[in-house]
Image (cartoon, rainbow, N blue to C red):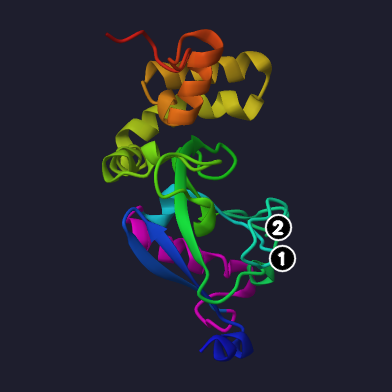
Amino acid sequence: MEEQNHNSGKITFKVKHLDEYHDILIDPNDERYAYKDQHQQIFEQLESITGVPSRYTTSFNIPRNMNPSDVNNIERFAHDLRMEYTEYMDDDIFSVNIRDGERFHLKYRVGYVYSISKRISMCYCLAEERDVPEEGCGLDVCQFTRTESYFKRLKDLVSNDELNAKITQLVQPLFEIASDETLTEAWKILKEFNVLQNFYPACYLDCRWRLAETGDARQIGLYLRTRG
């Protein structure tokens, strides 16, 4: 099967979202997509896996495995392949060196990408399975964010058209100007809508480090007011 996929140009790899594995297929011969729109097949499969409409997704990062091996070599990855909703693609999605059947875990975050979605939207990234600890957090992998309740919070946020319309009307012009003053004002508005803390989730490892360094593990400046 692996040789057949190689000969046809197809790449199939496993992605674990929450507690379930899914197949993602990259098919260069899929006639539904023009060459410049080939990355769209990734976003449509992510929509099927996560339930988040692809119109609310701005990016998906695939690590390029330049030296596939079972050795935990931290230098095995080159620059990530980044796919976004842009008119021209800087990378060819079929240039990724991923082995057929390779396993990854899906990471996700939200952000306001003024140049693409012009709203709060979902961003995905892959973590190779061998880099994900069975318990606790690891490098760039936070167990706190890998729960159904946390993902639902992000999904509800990016899918809230009414809230996003209000936010976009206020912050989009500020992000487009992109001066220090307007960016500060934009972040202030996001804080006033009580959404900024979702852009920077607290991780157990990060909280433990801040507690050791400062004696205070709170996320300073992300909330409009201190709770409790």
- State yes or no: residue 48 in magenta: yes
| Residue 104 x %, y % | 49, 60
Residue 83 in the figure: left or right of residue 50: right
From the viewer's side, name the closer residue of 28 and 152.
152
Q: Dot 1: what SS?
A: loop
Quarter of the rendering containing residue 173: top right
Quarter of the rendering containing residue 100: bottom right
Compared to residue 172, the image places residue 100 above or below, namely below
Tag 2: amino acid = Arg
- The answer to whether one can see residue 116 in this image is yes
Q: Which residue is mark 2?
A: 76
Compared to residue 177, the image places residue 77 above or below, namely below
Q: Which residues are magenta?
A: 28-52
| Residue 197 x %, y % | 42, 24
Q: Which residue is mark 1?
A: 67
Tag 1: amino acid = Asn
- The answer to whether one can see residue 203 in this image is no
> Upstream in the sequence, badge 1 or badge 2?
1
Picture residue at 68% right of the left edge, 19% below the top: 179
From the viewer's side, name the closer residue of 208 and 51.
208
Compared to residue 203, the image places residue 126 above or below, namely below
Distance between the Cα atoms at labels 1 and 2? 5 Å
Q: Quadrant of the C terminus?
A: top left
Judge the density around disc 2: few (<14), some (14-19), many (≥20) Cα neighbours within 10 Å.
Answer: some
